[in-house]
Image: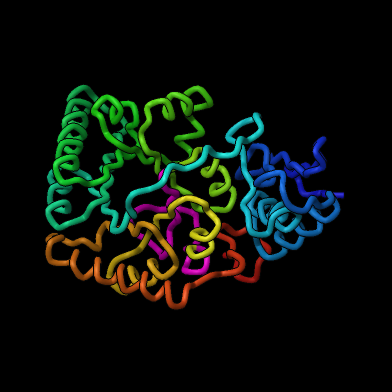
């Protein structure tokens, strides 16, 4: 019998397990990846759940690992965004390009710099102030429009952070949203976002977020922070190369490595893990044209190393502490 608060396991009519999560970190239905494969018992699930929590995983992440052990060791389960059962993501269309070096910039001027340096994937990230006024909104709209034009002229793939409605109005090809933002949209808002046809990039920091992101058939799923980062404060432990390689193998979507990637040596390692895109912020420096060629060479070297000897972690480590692991803060 499972006695972990907020984790309720039951057997569905088709014989598969399903789990209702209502934990500190996640709320929704967790279900196996598909109907094929072995179907375990609630007792087996409880044993695996307890074992994962003993390793230091929080309840939501422990439930993901328990579901995989019980049903599909090599397939991530699905996690719903609300009370509705999660649906398997729509089949992905064939992708024509890798994301490669991925720059995050805070202005159209900076965007033109990185495009001139040869970067072909860019995110415009302009955070909303506490009290945005009409002047700020007009300036934001102008930055987005200028960025759309610049990326179209350069043949680059653009993602607008957060401001998805404005991005749609400006004809942006893609948006990037965090999971708290996607949750806040609600079912109707997420449907409206999908109806725009814009490509979607989604942040993820934990196993349950990875399972939830998959259901929206994203263009990519970001894994971070790979290394410690000063860009913004966050509660997550660094993913490291083991979690990044596991993400890349399990996500069933392109993975972008983000967080603390400052130079060529880290680009090599991220590429060797299988990252489709490698996000650079501070590492581009004041003169991107001076550093981008070395970073691109490092990316190719990492991919060549991956082809010869890929990094494939068999099991991830906790990205949040539940207070029980020997390494808990």
Q: Is residue 308 left or right of residue 249?
A: left
Q: Is residue 129 left or right of residue 52?
A: left
- State how many labels appear: 0
Q: Is residue 242 magenta?
A: yes
Q: Which span of residues is magenta-colored?
A: 219-243
Q: Nearer the viewer, residue 161 or 214?
A: 214
Q: Nearer the viewer, residue 221 or 280?
A: 221
Q: Is residue 26 left or right of residue 177?
A: right
Residue 63 picture location, percent across and down: 70, 51
Residue 203 picture location, percent across and down: 44, 47
Please name the predominant secondary structure of the magenta segment in the image: loop
Q: Is residue 216 left or right of residue 56?
A: left
The quadrant holding residue 128 is top left
The quadrant holding residue 125 is top left
Instruction: Specify the color scheme.
Output: rainbow
Q: Is residue 316 magenta?
A: no
Q: Nearer the viewer, residue 192 or 96?
A: 96
Q: Is residue 60 above or below residue 28?
A: below
Residue 40 picture location, percent across and down: 81, 52
Going 58% across and 35% down the picture, which residue do you hit?
81
Going 33% across and 68% down the picture, which residue do you hit?
267
Residue 303 picture location, percent across and down: 37, 69
């Amino acid at each position: 019998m499972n006695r972990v608060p907020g984790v309720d396991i039951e057997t569905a009519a088709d014989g598969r397990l399903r789990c209702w999560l209502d934990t500190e970190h996640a709320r929704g239905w967790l279900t196996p990846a598909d109907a094929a494969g072995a179907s375990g018992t609630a007792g087996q699930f409880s044993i695996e759940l307890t074992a994962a929590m003993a390793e230091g995983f929080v309840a939501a992440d422990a439930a993901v690992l328990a579901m995989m052990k019980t049903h599909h060791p090599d397939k991530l389960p699905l996690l719903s965004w609300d009370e509705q059962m999660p649906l398997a993501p729509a089949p992905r269309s064939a992708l024509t390009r890798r994301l490669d070096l991925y720059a995050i910039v805070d202005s159209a001027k900076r965007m033109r710099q990185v495009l001139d340096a040869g970067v072909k994937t860019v995110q415009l990230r302009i955070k909303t102030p506490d009290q945005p006024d009409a002047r700020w909104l007009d300036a934001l709209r102008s930055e987005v429009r200028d960025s759309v034009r610049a990326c179209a002229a350069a043949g680059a793939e653009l993602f607008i952070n957060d401001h998805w409605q404005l991005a749609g109005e400006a004809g942006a090809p893609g948006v990037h949203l965090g999971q708290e933002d996607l949750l806040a949209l609600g079912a109707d808002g997420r449907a409206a976002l999908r109806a725009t046809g814009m490509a979607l990039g989604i942040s993820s920091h934990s196993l349950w977020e990875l399972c939830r992101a998959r259901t929206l058939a994203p263009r990519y799923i970001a894994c971070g922070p790979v290394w410690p980062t000063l860009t913004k404060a966050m509660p997550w432990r660094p993913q490291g190369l083991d979690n990044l390689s596991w993400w890349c193998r399990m996500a069933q979507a392109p993975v972008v490595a983000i967080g603390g990637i400052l130079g060529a040596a880290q680009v090599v390692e991220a590429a060797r893990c299988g990252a489709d895109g490698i996000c650079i912020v501070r590492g581009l420096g004041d003169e991107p044209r001076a550093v981008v060629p070395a970073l691109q060479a490092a990316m190719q070297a990492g991919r060549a190393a991956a082809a010869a000897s890929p990094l494939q972690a068999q099991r991830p480590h906790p990205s949040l502490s539940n207070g029980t692991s020997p390494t808990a803060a």
